[in-house]
């Protein structure tokens, strides 16, 4: 029982980290694109 809980907990943490990493990547990409377009607009 303890081992199963441990495995479930570790799997949950790994899945959560992957999800957070993916979300963070999307967010940073979105902000980078917005910042670049804004800078391009100002420079133009």
Image (cartoon, helix red, strand yellow):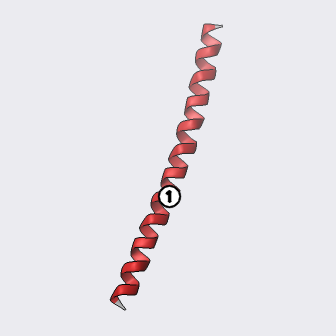
User: In the visual, does 2 lie left or right of 25?
Assistant: left
**Image vertical order of residue 43 relative to residue 36, above or below:** above
Q: Residue at x 36, y 80 (%)?
A: 6
Report helix, strand or loop for mark 1: helix
Q: Nearer the viewer, residue 11 or 34?
A: 11
Q: Quadrant of residue 13?
A: bottom left
- Find residue 19 and report its horizontal and vertical position in percent: 52, 57
**Image vertical order of residue 8 relative to residue 16, above or below:** below
Estimate how packed mark 1 is, as few (under 14), some (14 to 19) or many (20 or more) residues with alpha carbons within 10 Å. Answer: few
Viewport quadrant of the C terminus: top right
Q: Quadrant of residue 9?
A: bottom left
Viewport quadrant of the N terminus: bottom left
Give the farthest residue toward the bottom: 1
Q: Nearer the viewer, residue 43 or 21?
A: 21
Q: Residue at x 58, y 16 (%)?
A: 39
User: In the visual, does 38 lie left or right of 17?
Assistant: right
- Find residue 5 and report its horizontal and vertical position in percent: 38, 83
Which residue lies under the disc numbered 1?
18
**Image vertical order of residue 32 relative to residue 11, above or below:** above
Give the farthest residue toward the left: 2
Q: Residue at x 43, y 78 (%)?
A: 8
How many marks the image carries: the answer is 1
């Amino acid at each position: 029982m303890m081992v199963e809980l441990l495995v479930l907990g570790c799997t949950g943490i790994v899945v959560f980290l992957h999800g957070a990493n993916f979300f963070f990547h999307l967010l940073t990409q979105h902000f980078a694109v917005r910042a670049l377009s804004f800078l391009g607009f100002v420079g133009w």
